[in-house]
Image (cartoon, rainbow, N blue to C red):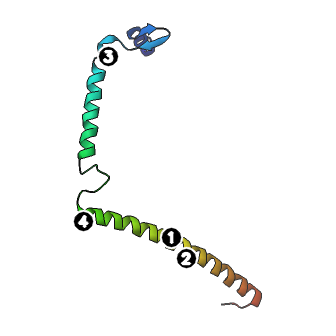
Amino acid sequence: MEQTEHRDMAVQTNGIDKPPDDHTDALPKALETLTEILETMYTSEFFSKAPKDNRTRFWTKYLQVAKEHDQEFLERHNANLDGLLIFVGKFKYLTGKQS
C-alpha cells in the first residue's frame, strides 16, 4: 500500500518517476547549504588535514616518520627472526640435543 501512495505522488515522465514540483525548490537551497558547510570545514582547524601551527606540524610529521621507521624495523627483524628460528629448529633436530 505504501508503494502505491508513493507512485501516486510521483509524476510519470518518459518512464521515469520524478518527485512532485513542490520539492524541486529545496534542492538549490540544500546545495548552497552543503557548499557552505564544506567551505567551513576546509577552513576549520578541526577538519584541516595540514596543521596550522609549527609545533603541531612537527609532531604530525614526526609521528608519520616514526610509524614508517617502526614498520620497516618490524618487517626486517621479523624476517630475520623467522630465519633464525628455522635454523635453530633444524640444528636442534640434526644434532638431537634436547633443551
- Mark drawn on residue 77: 2
For marks 4 and 3, give the one nearer the viewer: 4
Ranked by sequence position, the earlier of labels 1 and 3 is 3
Sequence-first tag of 3 and 2:
3
**Image marks 4 and 2: residues in contact by CB distance under 8 Å:** no
> Does dot 1 land on a helix, a strand or a loop?
helix
What residue sits right under mark 4 in the picture? Answer: 55
Between discs 2 and 1, the one toward the N terminus: 1
- Which mark lies nearer to you, 1 or 4? 4
Residue matched to label 1: 72
The mark that comes first in sequence, 4 or 3, is 3
Q: Nearer the viewer, residue 51 or 92?
A: 51
* Earlier sequence position, callout 1 versus callout 4: 4
Q: CA distance from mark 3 to mark 2?
A: 62 Å
Q: Amino acid at mark 3?
A: Thr
Q: Quadrant of residue 87?
A: bottom right
Mark number displayed over residue 11: none
Q: Identify residue type, mark 2.
A: His
Dot 3, how many residues are within 10 Å of its Cα: few (below 14), some (14-19), or many (20+)?
few
How far is mark 1 from mark 4, CA to CA? Answer: 26 Å
Mark 4–mark 3 distance (CA, rounded to whole Å): 48 Å
What is the x, y in percent for residue 54?
Answer: 24, 63
Q: Secondary structure at mark 4?
A: helix
Q: Is residue 69 above or below residue 33?
A: below
Contact check, label 4 and label 3, Cβ < 8 Å? no
Give the image quarter of residue 93: bottom right
Q: Earlier in the sequence, mark 4 or mark 2?
A: 4
The mark tally for this picture is: 4
Q: Amino acid at mark 4?
A: Arg
